[in-house]
Image (cartoon, rainbow, N blue to C red):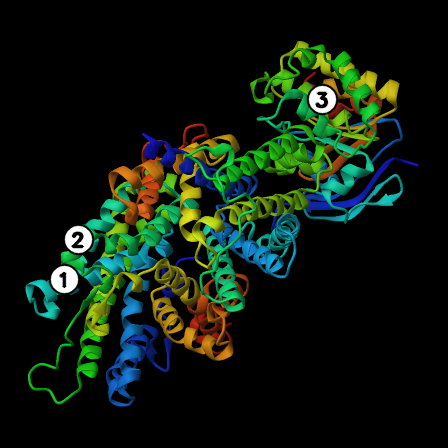
Amino acid sequence: MALLEVTGLHAGYGAADVLRGVSFAVEQGGITAVLGANGAGKTTLLRAVSGMLGRRGSIRFDGQPIEKTATEDIARLGVAHVPDGRGTFLDLTTEENLRIGAYTRKDRTTVAQDLERVFTYFPRLKERRQQQAGTLSGGEQQMLAVSRALMLRPRLLLLDEPSFGLAPLVVQDIFGILRAINAEQGVSVLLVEQNAGLALDLADNAYVLETGQVVMSGTTEAVRSDEAVRRAYLGY
Amino acid sequence: MEAFLHQVFSGLATGGIYASLALALVMIYQSTNHINFAQGEMAMFSTYLAWSMINGGMPYWWAFLLTVLVSFVVGAAIERIIIRPVEDAPVLSVVTVFIALLVIFNSVAGWIFTYTIKTFPSPFPEQPLFGNRYISSHELGSIAVTLLVLVALYLFFRFTPLGLAMRAAAQNPLSSRLAGIRVGSMLALGWGLAAAVGAVAGLLVAPIVYLEPNMMAGVLLYAFAAALVGGIDNPFGAVLGGFMVGVLENLIGAYVIGTELKLTVALVLIVGVLLFKPSGMFGKVFVSRV
Amino acid sequence: MNSAVAADDVMAPRYAGVSLRAWRAIGLAALLAGAVALPFLVSNYRVFQFNLVLIYAIVLLGLNILTGYNGQISLGHGAFYAIGAYAAAILMDQFGWPYWTTLPVAGLVCFVFGFLFGLPALRLRGHYLALATFALAVAMPQILKYKHIEQWTGGVQGIVIVKPEAPFGLKITADQWLYLFTLAILVLMFALGWNLLRGRVGRALVAIRDHPVAAEAMGVHGALYKTLAFGVSALYAGVAGALGAIVVQFVAPDSFTAGLSINFLIGIVIGGVASISGAFYGALFIQFVPNFADQISKAAPWAIYGVFLLAFVYLMPAGVAGFVRLAWMRMRAARHRPVTHPHREK
């Protein structure tokens, strides 16, 4: 059974729906990518899953319906969302940001272990541990956002354009760690990206979103080999 | 010289009280960007509660503790029930709700406890401590209690997960919810804490200004001024501002214009700070440039 | 909170062969006739009460220009009202001016004070402005009691004024005359206000309230309009204050506490923010509901008042005026659809 199963999802910000009947799934331990151009509804899709906006349709997480669940309760089920704009707490220190990620967890020792673990993933954050997060560079803030999400010990990680605005080397770094996290800890990932090449390298399943509807889906290989996708999103 | 020192010390004592109330204002401002006009009246009402308990024979410190607790609960309840529905309403609606609260607390206090002025006991001895000539025991005690409250709050916000979550919720509610923080509860908690701190201020100031439903109007203005002097988004600034304003008020009252215009001093301070240093001494800039 | 301008300026439809605009004129004339007749129908005390309603309506219109139309919250209009009242009282008491000559002076003095207060207010928004003006309201009684101006203000005792009698040998009581006098001033002030708000200035004020950046970009001089709004608004309060002093025949510092300013804010919230007619509903409310609240609970009338206020914010955020407008539009839409929307008739 899929970890996240979405069927016939409608969502939007007011009068008009941005998503119009979207269905997709994220397998247990899998990485699913959602591709699409600007305005296709990718960010809306993640927000709808997290309950940040009004939605209709069925969303099941681990078999449990969550389409009426509040954002904070969805997080408590083990869904960590790295939002667009990264959602950094700019006035708090790096370490405080990470501790907020672990807010729902009560066991101090495992939290301390996880803190060390993310510091081994991103040694840069350890150097900046007591620094105000607002003073971090864009790349460091993205690392912080991913780390903050990991501190929740999520079963599902929602990533909103983690490559956005970052230097290629930093992007490589972050994606390498995402792959490791997925392999070592079995965290399932739902990744939304404009950079299709990058996303397809990481994912095992992909969906293509156009104006709020899924126009194509399948394994990464199948999607990658599709003529239209190649022309529109991969540029060759 | 002796008179001058006396003015400074008693200024520090009332300043500590302004600091507490200013801190209450800042706490609510930080999490909601609202300035709670009813903060003073809530503190006044708390003080009446304590008065009834003490009159009923309860020992002072028990009454103190119980009052602070009840104030906390009532403050949180007000946030949940009355403030929550207008959270995203236009500023005018929010201000109107605060004004309504102010009026209701004031009137209900007058109704239950009448408008006659009452004395309120001080828990500290009547004789000055350590045989000093400059500062009464109540003044010294007020400063001590204020500082104690401030340190406790500092430790809470700085070192506990709950305190951290409250700061996070105030700063970035959306991101906080994604981390599983119940932002609504944090707001209610903030209101509760503010009401509790306000209650402490009320209990400390009552022996000085006497207990009556309008006792807090002046104190509230000074607390506003203090919060603004320090920077309305900075708790430490607010506390420092409180002490400064307290001393300033006393000195200006004693040596410059006399005590009849005390409130005007507060007015001038408020307008002056807003005009010339709107971010206060330690705060961030908040004014509109348009 | 939306502007009344848009709602009232719908294409002039017709009903029973007469344009809506004409209907409105007829309605206004009838209302005015009723207002003129009123003092001859009720007791002198009632006349006095209704006189105060008219005076409050002037303040509320002024406050609405500032808070409703321009979005600058003032919790300090009681202070301007006090300044107007004292200006009138001092001129009459110390200099022997006739009562009617004090109104322009009171208005002008308040305009200057308002304009000056509007300068620092330019940099403030929302809560901060409310706070600064609130401080003004709280400090006002103290300022009025200040001993170095006691020779003018009469200190705590205040000033007693002689009630003016009806002129031209008219056979009406002083109360009736003052009522009619106030009514005339009110009509004048409302005509001025109406002209101001319906035209370019009104649009500019609303634009500054709703879209400050865009307004500035389109060449609306925001700072000037905002300070002027403050001045004009204070002018209304000042004229009303002067009238209030004359009618009550007495000014004293403790008549002008923060409670008065709060009352005015309550008036516009309940009457209807950014609405001209709302001033009347608000004025009726602040004059009569406290009595009514008194009857519900002798002990805590202000608490009832506060509960009213909460109820309005939650249930009727556009105030009475908004409610009336909505009801009127619904009625019209239901009954006269063919008339108001002829093009929909196929």
Q: Which residue is mark 1?
A: C90
Q: Which residue is mark 2?
A: C149
Query: For the residue carrying disc 3, how many other residues have a C-alpha within 10 Å: few (<14), some (14-19), or many (20+)?
Result: many
- Dot 1 lies on which element? helix
Query: For the residue carrying disc 1, how many other residues have a C-alpha within 10 Å: few (<14), some (14-19), or many (20+)?
Result: many
Give the camera-side residue of B200 and B6: B6
Q: Position of residue B33 (x, y in %)?
A: 51, 42
Q: Is residue B140 above or below residue C318?
A: above
Q: Position of residue C159 (x, y in %)?
A: 18, 66
Q: As drawn, is A174 to the left or to the right of B45? A: right
Amino acid on which disc 3 is placed: Ala
Q: Chain of mark 1?
A: C
Q: Which residue is mark 3?
A: A196
Q: Residue at x 79, y 38 (%)?
A: A76
Q: Position of residue B103 (x, y in %)?
A: 47, 61
Is residue C217 at all visible to an observer of this figure?
no
Q: Chain of mark 2?
A: C
Q: Residue at x 24, y 73 (%)?
A: C248
